[in-house]
Image (spheres, rainbow, N blue to C red):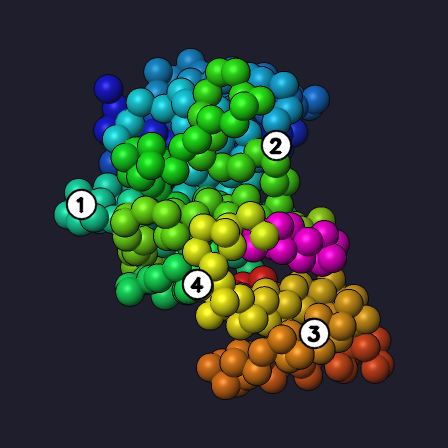
Amino acid sequence: MPRASIVVPAYNSADTLPATLDSLLAQSFSDFEIIVVNDGSTDETGAVAAAYATDPRVNVVSQANRGLAGARNTGIAAARGEYIGFCDADDLWAREKLAAHVEHLDQNTDIGLSYSGSRLIDEEGLPMGAAQRPRLKGVTGAHIFKRNPIGNGSAAVMRRAALRDLAYRPRSEPSRDWVFDETFRQSEDIECWLRLALTTDWQIEGVGGSLTMYRINGNGLSANTDRQLAAWERVVSKLRPLNPEFFMRHEATARAYQLRYLARRAVSALDGDAAWAMVRHAMYHSLVPIIEEPIKTVTTIAAAALLRAIGPSPINYAVRLRAGIASR
């Protein structure tokens, strides 16, 4: 059996899937399989995946659309590796990424989730000059809740044993376990990572380097911030009963950080009203972000205020990028 499996959820990804698979097949660590989950695509994704399946390392699983969480769960069920990584069908991995995570997990048997920093690329796959450089060591549930150092769904490589400890079988599910909650169409990553921190003894730790190339597209920047906030609130409501004392201590600050993050997204989408509403709500819930990260928080407040007051014309590309989703 392969040592590692890489799960690639793919929905209408015919344009970007070849670059994703090329980057995965070029990994310096060679003992792996790739599981492409064609999640009910209506474009040529299935044909693209089938063409790559001539390589014995590539396996294609097709299913009716179940969303990103459902595609990942299907991939996990089909995976044979001891370590299982995730790469969305529009993102890329650096050649040395899998090797770094395998070494990391081999040397630290208490780590259940290994991740890396990420470089941002645009819709054409070109570098945007920004990166997610997260905290790597000493990561607690509070760090996951407030700042999500894992950053995105293509950064993580997990130990099969940790996935097994997270798995559950809903009554409505006839065939396989869930690791990611398929009732979420947003925030399914943070729900999974935080549940791992709250319900298991597995450690979460990063490796150095920006080893994931995370694609930013226009739709992602302009995604409805109210809908994203509602999904985050669902995560809190679902997990709060697991550890009420944890949420009593950290929920207000985490909500302020989440609202600040969404304000930065709204600035990037040039939505001044939404950005200003988000920063006001953030400061109402907690002033901790302005104490812990004064430069980033004040910059966010200033950008939101300026955008709301005089419109998008003075907000140049660099300012939008720095106030955007390069980091939370």
Q: Is residue 44 above or below residue 15?
A: above
Q: Are marks 1 and 3 in contact (CB under 8 Å)?
A: no
For label 3, the residue is 281
Q: Which residues are magenta?
A: 223-236
Q: Which mark is residue 246?
A: 4
Query: Residue at 72% across / 52% down in the picture?
Result: 227
**Residue 200 appearing in the image:** yes
Q: In the picture, which quadrant includes the N terminus?
A: top left
The secondary structure making up most of the magenta span is helix
Query: Residue at 49% across / 63% down in the picture?
Result: 247
Residue depth check, mark 2 versus mark 4: number of the one nearer the observer: 4
SS label for mark 1: loop
Question: Residue lying furthest right in this view?
Answer: 310
Q: Specify which label sits upstream in the sequence, 1 or 4.
A: 1
**Residue 193 appearing in the image:** no
Q: Is residue 187 above or below residue 16?
A: below
Which amino acid type is shown beneath numbered disc 2?
Answer: Gly
Q: What number of labels is visible?
A: 4
Residue depth check, mark 3 versus mark 2: number of the one nearer the observer: 3
Q: Is residue 224 magenta?
A: yes
Other-residue count near label 1 (Cα within 10 Å), few / some / many at <14 / 14–19 / ≥20: few
Position in image of residue 296 (x %, y %): 55, 79
* Cα–Cα span, label 3 and label 4: 22 Å
Position in image of residue 81 (x %, y %): 29, 27
Other-residue count near label 2 (Cα within 10 Å), few / some / many at <14 / 14–19 / ≥20: some
Q: Is residue 198 above or below residue 48?
A: below
Which amino acid type is shown beneath numbered disc 4?
Answer: Phe
* Cα–Cα span, label 2 and label 4: 30 Å
Residue depth check, mark 1 versus mark 4: number of the one nearer the observer: 4
Residue depth check, mark 3 versus mark 4: number of the one nearer the observer: 4
Position in image of residue 238 (x %, y %): 55, 48
For label 1, the residue is 109
